[in-house]
Amino acid sequence: MVPTNFYITLSAILFATGAMGVLVRRNPLIIFMSVELMLNAANLAFVAFASQHGSLDGQIFVFFVMTVAAAEVAVGLALIVQIFKSKHSINVDEVNSLKG
Amino acid sequence: MENHGFAFLAPWLVFAPVVGLLINIILGGWFMKQPWGEKAIGAVAVLASGAAFVVSVLLAYTVSAAHGEALTVPFAQWIHIGTLELDWTFRLDSLSTTMMLVVSGVGTLIHIYAIGYMHEDVRFKNDIPRYQRFFVFLNLFIAMMMILVSGDSYMMLFVGWEGVGLCSFLLIGFWYDMDTLGRSSWANSNAAKKAFITNRIGDFGFLIAGFLMFWYLGSFQFDQVFEAAPALAHEHPGIIVLITLFMLIGVAGKSAQIPLYVWLPDAMAGPTPVSALIHAATMVTAGVYLITRSAELYTLVPQAQYIVAMTGAGTALFAATIAVGQYDIKKVLAYSTISQLGFMVAAVGMGAYVAGMFHLITHAFFKALLFLSAGSVILGLERGHHHLAHHGHGHHDGHHEEVFDPGDMRNMGGLRKTMPVTFWLYMIGTLALAGIVPFAGFWSKDEILLDASLHYPGVYALLTIAAFLTAFYMGRQVWMVFFGEARHAAAAHAEESPLIITAPLMVLAALSLLGGGLNLPFEGFHNLGHWLEHTLHEVEALPLNLQVAGISTGLALAAIFVSWWLYGRNPLKAKQPDPLKKPLGLIFEGMENKWFVDEGYWAVFVNRYVDISRFLADKVDWWFWHDIFHEKVIAGTYNWLSNVFLNDVADQKGIDAFANFLGRATQWLSAATRKLQNGFVRSYALSVLLGVVIILGYLIFK
């Protein structure tokens, strides 16, 4: 059996990669993918702990996260389509009309 | 308490006149619109005063039935504070009932006279509605005088004392908007104020005496004061001297003695019935009554008695000298009144209370008679003057220029023929005042002189000279007014007064003629003495002393002869100066000008008072209080407080500055924080990440 630490370490690497992607990339599609990566890192950690503790709570939580992520992607893609329609660009650096 | 006859009627002494005056106040205005209105008002007033007289008679009868025992009739509670118990209680004894009889008796006669006198007076002065007011005041005076003489304590006496002072003020200033000649002026109202203020000085003395009395003797009630006084006189005789001398100041004010007599001659500004009733017969004798009432205090301190006697004697002589130099018929009588009051005060000062009261009574008769007759003379001249104004068309133009003084004896002369009734009545009054046997004045004055000759030779000398002058100035007046030729057309056309005026005079003349019978100096005839003995306890009943009586009668006859020699032998011509002017020179100048006492008072007191008032008004009030204290201190402080402190410091630098600071701080803070809101999603995401890292770091490493 693979030790839980390995899973957690993998999860942390995935999360850090996702976070870095959200922060540095300018394409919203990539950012969404990075967000998915962070969500799945969390899912991995849930599942790992669930398997270690022999509890189904983590597994159930993962289903919820996946459902919410799917809904979130649907809303996000719709937003991106609308932004592209008004600005003819989806570069997030150009979407700064809330600047104080 | 057993039955005391008519004592229960005592309150009606005061309330009968009060009812009268209320009727005249309420209904008088309606009466005046009726043709019989003046008669109705007069009748109400006379009946009110007459009712008081009837009550007085019944009360005197009650006292005599009780063998002179003093009766007290409690009427109302007044002031009860601590040990002070002041009630309105009527005191009925031989002294107070005597005063009541004089006040209401003479008062009623003068009321009757006033119906006729005021009827003409309001027409000459052209103000008929004022008729009503006169009788209201006159009845009020009777009520106040009754409170004065019937009070059972010094404070009740003081209430009446102030009340009659008020009535005196109101009646002197009855024609307040004119002078005695009817010209528009404040002269009469100034005379009223002078009387009131001078009396206030006297009342101050009375009050101090009252306070001392309460402080040391513990009461104002007559019997309690007299009971406690001997013990105090034994321990601190000085206190009794102080009380009696302060009381003397009050007496000097009310009874017109030196140095406060100056108001009485000016009081002649009032209508003649007022001069007769208030300023000759009744109110001015209140001081004599007060000393007689306080006999038991004065008897304890012979020093004070001596001062009182000398004050009276000095006043008697001093006023008599002034009377010689006066030309106004009423002024002569006014100074004569002061002089005669001096006789009374001297008498009561010497302890001759019966003689003083006797003279008070006879003087009330003959001086009221003289004043009222003088009023009749003045009216006669007014009628003559009126007659001229209507019939003498020839000199009509000059008439409005000349101001006619109907009271000036230099305008009179020869009235014996035109006013015979008044002349004979005046003669009776004159002879009574001059002290000729057997008129009332002789007996009473002789009793005073006799007492003075036995105990106080100085007083006797002063009074004898005063008696000589009395006969002289009365002789002068009679020769000038009634004899010789008329010196003015008005006097030539003078008309006799109607019966309503002369009838009361006849009664007074009869009293002046027979009044001596009250107290003849023969064994068994000391009626007044025995009557007053019940109240005054020790009374000296002196037999007739032929030497004293002879000297006074001789001097009076001599004075009348001298006055005839000067004024009767060669009657005064119009515009001729007084025959005494040349031989007496400066002395006559002094007599004519009242020895410049008024001017002296002006220079010494009134002007200084005005100076002080000016100083207080200009410097203290205006300059200090207004300019400095109010403007600078209060308004200045307020302005500084509101402008500088509250506005600049507290509001602008405090509250405003704080509000501004809040605004600026918000601006600065927002300027600083708006930079965080750069619109880049990445930077928000970084913030979220950093926040999560920090929170997690905290949770992990705490």
Image: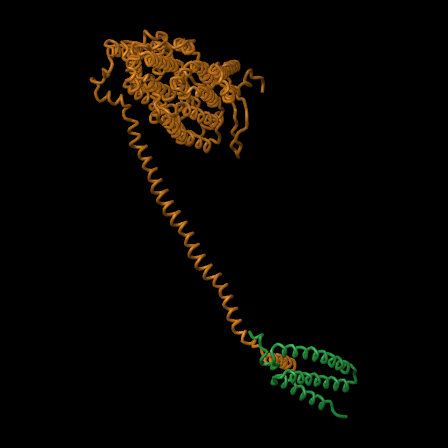
Chain colours: A green, B orange
Residue B306 in sight here: no
Q: Is residue B572 left or right of residue B53?
A: left
Residue furthest out toward the bottom: A1
Please state which of residues A64 and B375 is positioned toward the viewer in this rendering.
A64
Q: Looking at the figure, which quarter contains the C terminus of chain B?
A: bottom right
Q: How many numbered marks does the figure carry?
A: 0
Residue B269 in sight here: yes
Please state which of residues B687 and B651 is positioned toward the viewer in this rendering.
B687
Q: What percent of the width, then of the height, locates residue B201?
A: 38, 30
Q: What percent of the width, then of the height, locates residue B14?
A: 50, 21
Q: Looking at the figure, which quarter contains the N terminus of chain B?
A: top right
User: Considering only vertical position in the picture, is B305 above or below B488?
Assistant: below
Q: Is residue B198 left or right of residue B651?
A: left
Quarter of the image for residue B372 reads: top left
Quarter of the image for residue B272 reads: top left
Please state which of residues A91 and B353 is positioned toward the viewer in this rendering.
A91
Q: What percent of the width, then of the height, locates residue B451?
A: 36, 16
Q: What percent of the width, then of the height, locates residue B244?
A: 40, 27
Q: Is residue B696 left or right of residue B278?
A: right
User: Considering only vertical position in the picture, is B583 above or below B647?
Assistant: above
User: Considering only vertical position in the picture, is B459 above or below B212?
Assistant: above
Quarter of the image for residue B385 reads: top left
